[in-house]
């Protein structure tokens, strides 16, 4: 049970209290190169060239 591992007074955690955290990686120019299940590639001018989504159980999708 989640309430056993939660710090505090042993109160039960609620779904409303949950926080979704999305991690992102950036390159030296500040452009997003990876966010969640999506990777991004840029050309030399900084334009988005490839967006690749890789979700578990699905084929990778490039746009």
Image (cartoon, rainbow, N blue to C red):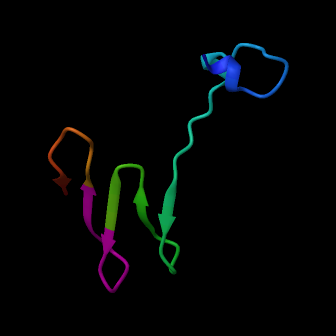
User: Going by the picture, which residue comes out furthest to the bottom?
Assistant: 44
| Above or below, comparing residue 7 to residue 59 in the picture | above
Residue 62 left/right relative to 8: left
Location of residue 21 (image quadrant): top right
Location of residue 46 (image quadrant): bottom left
Residue 24 left/right relative to 53: right
* Number of numbered labels in the structure image: 0
* Magenta residue span: 41-52
| Above or below, comparing residue 26 to residue 53 in the picture | below
User: Going by the picture, which residue comes out furthest to the right?
Assistant: 9
In the rendered image, residue 45 lying in the magenta stretch gets the answer yes
Residue 59 left/right relative to 50: left
Determine the residue positioned at 27% across, 60% down: 51
Q: Residue 47 placed where, x, y %? A: 33, 74
Q: Residue 45 placed where, x, y %? A: 35, 84
In the rendered image, residue 40 lying in the magenta stretch gets the answer no
Residue situated in front as seen by the camera: 49 or 20? 20
Q: Residue 2 placed where, x, y %? A: 63, 20
User: Going by the picture, which residue comes out furthest to the left?
Assistant: 59
Determine the residue positioned at 69% across, 18% down: 3
Task: Look at the image and tell me in which quarter the C terminus lies.
Answer: bottom left
| Above or below, comparing residue 61 to residue 28 in the picture | above
Task: Look at the image and tell me in which quarter the N terminus lies.
Answer: top right
Residue situated in front as seen by the camera: 3 or 20? 3
Residue situated in front as seen by the camera: 52 or 44? 52
Q: Residue 49 placed where, x, y %? A: 25, 70
């Amino acid at each position: 049970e989640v309430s056993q591992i939660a710090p505090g007074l042993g109160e039960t955690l609620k779904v409303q209290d949950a926080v979704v955290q999305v991690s992102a990686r950036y390159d030296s120019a500040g452009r997003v190169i990876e966010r969640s299940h999506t990777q991004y590639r840029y050309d030399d001018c900084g334009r988005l060239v490839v967006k690749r989504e890789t979700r578990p159980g699905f084929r990778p999708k490039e746009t």
